[in-house]
Amino acid sequence: MRLADFILRDIEPILVQWESFAATLLPAAQNIDSLALRDHAQQILEAVAKDLSTRQTQEQQNEKSIGRAPKLSDAPETAAQTHALLRARAGFNINQLAAEYRALRASVLRMWINECLPNAPDLDDMIRFNEAIDQAIVESVDFFNQHVEQARNLLLGMLGHDMRSPLQTIQMTASYLGALNAGEKVSEAAARLIRSGVRMQALLDDLCDFNRTKLGLGINIAPSDIDLAEVFSDAVDQLRAAYPDRCIDLDIQGDAHGIWDGKRLQQLLVNLVLNAIKYGAQDAPVQIAVAGDSAEVRFEVRNSGPAIDRLILEGIFDPLKRGPGRANKSDDPSLGLGLYIASEIVKAHHGAIEARSDKTETAFAVRLPRHA
């Protein structure tokens, strides 16, 4: 008997075995009824039987075996994709999802081979069946990962958003204590609270921005007519106050007016300067050079220090990465998102950012069209 005919004829015994195995996947399956345990299994088997009955070239079979079966542009989710989504929502993990397909493969082949005895089973049917199951696994795992990643990003985004209110209360209380002038010890404690609050605020801002980009929303900007000279001068004054032992030079040439989000460009500059302060030579100035022409404004943040390795430089704007030698240092409070957020801010303004590094200096160059 051909395998497609066997699957359609004996689909109920196959589903019984599917359900029996799914019930062992604890704790997720503990309180799930029979219908949910069989979720989309019948549709998956019917799709496999249809696939086995469809004429295919050797190239099509090879593509399907590695999960690259063609998809119709107007087709809804496949049964395997929907099954993965519902399993993820029910609390199954990815290993349990894959185990369902391993058990299905084994039970179908075993039952079919026993049915064929004493004759040998059709070898091509067996190969085609394995290819179809492999395709279903790829579809399920990919959809499962997408759902889990989106859920994680939403959770982190909500967490970052909800933590801002108590953090603002802490900062306001610390500022109030500092203003009381209630003695040197109280003032020092308030100052420590304020500094820690600022660091936590920066981490939360980066986390929220990162999650917006991972959810496909991009960096949120509110452009208006601003003078970049004023925006950058204000940011540099704050940086000089925070790092009084470091020299930060600002040089502005030409017209620096444009339609941009001033707060976001301050965030961009601060991220680039903080990166230069962290990884540049401690006894050399951080230089900021701004120049404008009729179409755009360009600026660079430069610092002296050891050259960045070429491979590191190629992925320097990737998220969740930090500079060489900093990954295990406890005094670095960053999440490794500073340069990634900087690049996303530039992207939101339809600009361009690049990095270069040699033995003399490391520089980050930004180009911003005047009307983003």
Image (spheres, grey):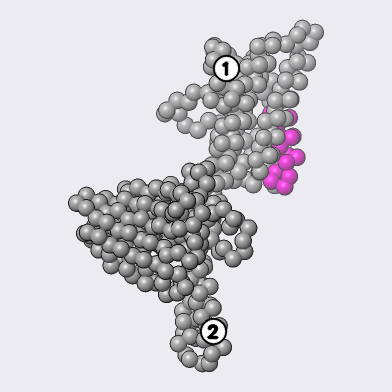
Q: 363 above or below 99?
A: below
Q: Name the residue rendered at 50%, 65% in the picture.
A: 282
Q: Nearer the viewer, residue 20 or 269?
A: 269
Q: What percent of the width, then of the height, locates residue 99? A: 70, 34
Q: Name the residue rendered at 56%, 32% in the picture.
A: 139
* For residue 304, side relative to residue 59 (left or right): left
> Where does the N terminus fall, quadrant-wise?
top right
Q: Residue furthest right?
A: 118
Q: Residue furthest top?
A: 119
Q: What percent of the width, then of the height, locates residue 119? A: 77, 7
Callout in the foreground (2, 1):
2
Q: Which residues, given as a range, are shown in magenta?
A: 15-30
Based on the displayed image, in which of its 4 quarters is residue 223 positioned?
Answer: bottom left
Crowd tier of the residue under label 1, counting other residues whose Cα lies within 10 Å: few below 14, some 14–19, many 20 or above: some
Say what secondary structure mark 2 lies in: helix
Based on the displayed image, in which of its 4 quarters is residue 33 positioned?
Answer: top right
Q: Which mark is residue 188?
A: 2
The residue pinned by badge 1 equals 61
Whether residue 261 is visible: no
Q: Name the residue rendered at 53%, 23% in the picture.
A: 69
Q: What percent of the width, then of the height, locates residue 284? A: 45, 64
